[in-house]
Amino acid sequence: MARESPATYRITDLTEAERPRERLAKHGPQVLSNAELLAILLRVGIQGENSVQMGQRLLQDLGGLPGLHRATLVELAGQFGMGLAKAAQIKAAIELGMRIHSLNPEERPLIRGPEDAAALVQDEMAALPQEHLRVINLDTRNRVINIEKLYVGSLNQSTVRIAEIFRPAIQRNAASIIIVHNHPSGDPSPSPEDMALTRGIIQAGKLLEINVLDHLVIGLGSYVSLKERGVTFG
């Protein structure tokens, strides 16, 4: 009777072509899976799991990258085999990635459509445990001036002051804005409250001569553009 091959527990048990660090050095980080990128941060696994397998388990248990982002340091450190040091390395890497998006103001992103706007905030906002409302302020060429974080909590016409939405746009002389908020449930389908709030913002924008280009609702791995759903913004 043939003996079963032992399970692979160590990165050194993998061939050199399969090791994450070697693959990154040869082909670049873009070819690595999420689990392999995590493995580089984890450095070593635990008994019964190499670092790649441990990364796969973390992603599965926490709900992918959004769940990894959403987890607190304490929650991440409490995962089997983690501890504070490994958790801190992962949280630091996530924070660095977020800060990179705020650099290079001279190369401000150009918004050609809702997919460009969603790409700026999708990864971060999909992981938020509460509703957040953001406003993307744009210049006359539809380049991003900045992204304002305005509200946290249940969003409707009674809790959101329309004037506060436009105040940063006026201060920064923005020509147009895009409203963005998330649904922590993961379902980006707009609610009646979302539609009512959008209509109020559009009317205020006309009075202030600031174009409201769209309202995006961010969900888990997807988004909805109210403009694409037929809402008139012009």
Image: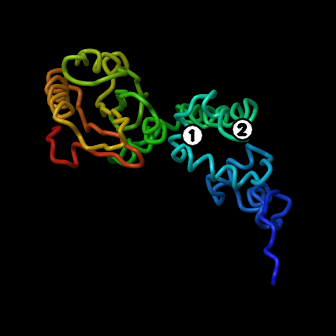
Q: Amino acid at mark 1?
A: Leu
Note whether 171 is above or below 70 in the view shown. above
Note whether 55 is above or below 214 in the view shown. below
Residue 204 sits in which quadrant? top left
Q: Earlier in the sequence, mark 2 or mark 1?
A: 1
Say whether marks 2 and 1 touch (CB < 8 Å).
no
Find numbered disc 1 in the image and state the secondary structure of the residue it sits on: helix
Looking at this rendering, what residue extends furthest in the front direction?
Answer: 1
The residue tagged 1 is 68
At horizontal 52% and vertical 40% (from top left) the residue drawn is 67
Q: Amino acid at mark 2?
A: Met
Find numbered disc 2 in the image and state the secondary structure of the residue it sits on: loop
Q: Is residue 203 left or right of residue 154?
A: left
Where is residue 189 shown, x and y percent of the image?
Answer: 25, 44
Specify the quadrant that holds the N terminus: bottom right
Taking depth in this image into account, of 10 and 182 the one nearest to the observer is 10
Taking depth in this image into account, of 76 and 173 the one nearest to the observer is 76
Looking at this rendering, what residue extends furthest in the right direction?
Answer: 12
Mark 1 is surrounded, within 10 Å at the Cα level, by few (under 14), some (14 to 19) or many (20 or more) other residues, namely: many
Where is residue 136 shown, x and y percent of the image?
Answer: 37, 31
The residue tagged 2 is 82
Where is residue 51 shown, x and y percent of the image?
Answer: 74, 51
Q: CA distance from mark 2 to mark 1?
A: 13 Å
Note whether 162 is above or below 189 in the view shown. above
**Rendering colour mode:** rainbow
